[in-house]
Amino acid sequence: SSLFRWPFLRYLPTFGHDHLWFASCLYHGNSFVVIEDGTANYNPRALFSYARVGKHQKFKRILLGPFHNLNRFGNNKIVNRIYLSGLQEIPKEIAEKVVFFDIANEWNKLAEVDKYKILSIFNVTKTELKNISKKKYLLLTQPLDDDNSLRIPSELYPRVYKEILKEYPQEEVLIKVHPREGFNYRENFKGYEVFDKPVPMELLVLLNFPYN
């Protein structure tokens, strides 16, 4: 159990997403703070669990954890606060728990040394940042073979993306690989600048790169 290895978890607040299957593993009776997950937090339908409530729910919660069959994205009794940036209108069900934050403003308050400390968590070097900042066009890839609505096989990626990229000068393009992908873009897109470290795009946006 993580509590035996890291007993301090019992006293620390947990920051994360309550809709993920492993959320219960992180929660040990302390406070749970939900952080924004794109636009899903603003969708009223996404706030509710539509799993069928059957018998033996207490037993299932012992096995599967306290978040089993609970509403999601902070719309439950376990979550204390929800940090949102205000992308869209806040659903009334969670409004009282919401704390607004301006991530760009907070980032700009940091000293340069602190910004690089955060970037170093993702193993990003200053040389890499310099190289990718020179590009004009940005292609954000997606794990399309894992998308329930599309299911495009990864072997078709070169054809799909090269069709998109043919309009742009190769030397001015940066291919930013989605963190969940395993496809080898370096091998299949030779001549392009490929950035495949698992860095959230939201972090690169804060660096104000001049992508078109």
Image: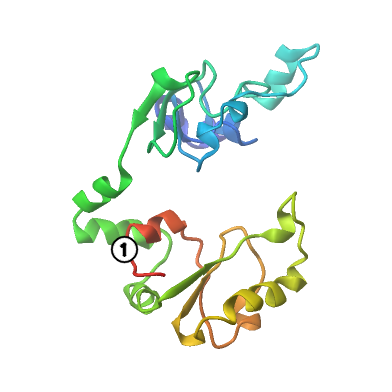
Q: Nearer the viewer, residue 210 or 8?
A: 210
Q: Residue at x 71, y 53 (%)?
A: 147
Q: Residue furthest right?
A: 55
In percent of width and height, residue 98 lies at 39, 25
- Give the left or right position of residue 108, taking residue 188 as reference: left
Q: Tell me the quarter of the image containing the C terminus.
A: bottom left
- Give the left or right position of residue 211, taking residue 73 as reference: left
- Does residue 126 lie above or below 88 as drawn? below
In percent of width and height, residue 30 lies at 45, 22
What type is the residue that disc 1 sits on?
Asn
| Res 1 → quadrant | top right
**What residue would you read off at disc 1?**
208
In percent of width and height, residue 84 lies at 40, 35
Q: Nearer the viewer, residue 134 or 31?
A: 134
- Give the left or right position of residue 185, taking residue 115 as reference: right
How packed is label 1: few (under 14 Cα within 10 Å), some, or many (20 or more)?
A: few
Q: Residue at x 19, y 49 (%)?
A: 109
In percent of width and height, residue 124 lies at 39, 67
Total marks drawn?
Answer: 1
Q: Nearer the viewer, residue 102 or 129?
A: 102
Applied colour scheme: rainbow
Q: Residue furthest front?
A: 167
Query: Visible in this render: residue 30?
Result: no
Q: Residue at x 37, y 59 (%)?
A: 205
Q: Secondary structure at mark 1?
A: loop
Query: Visible in this render: residue 69?
Result: yes
Q: Residue at x 33, y 57 (%)?
A: 206
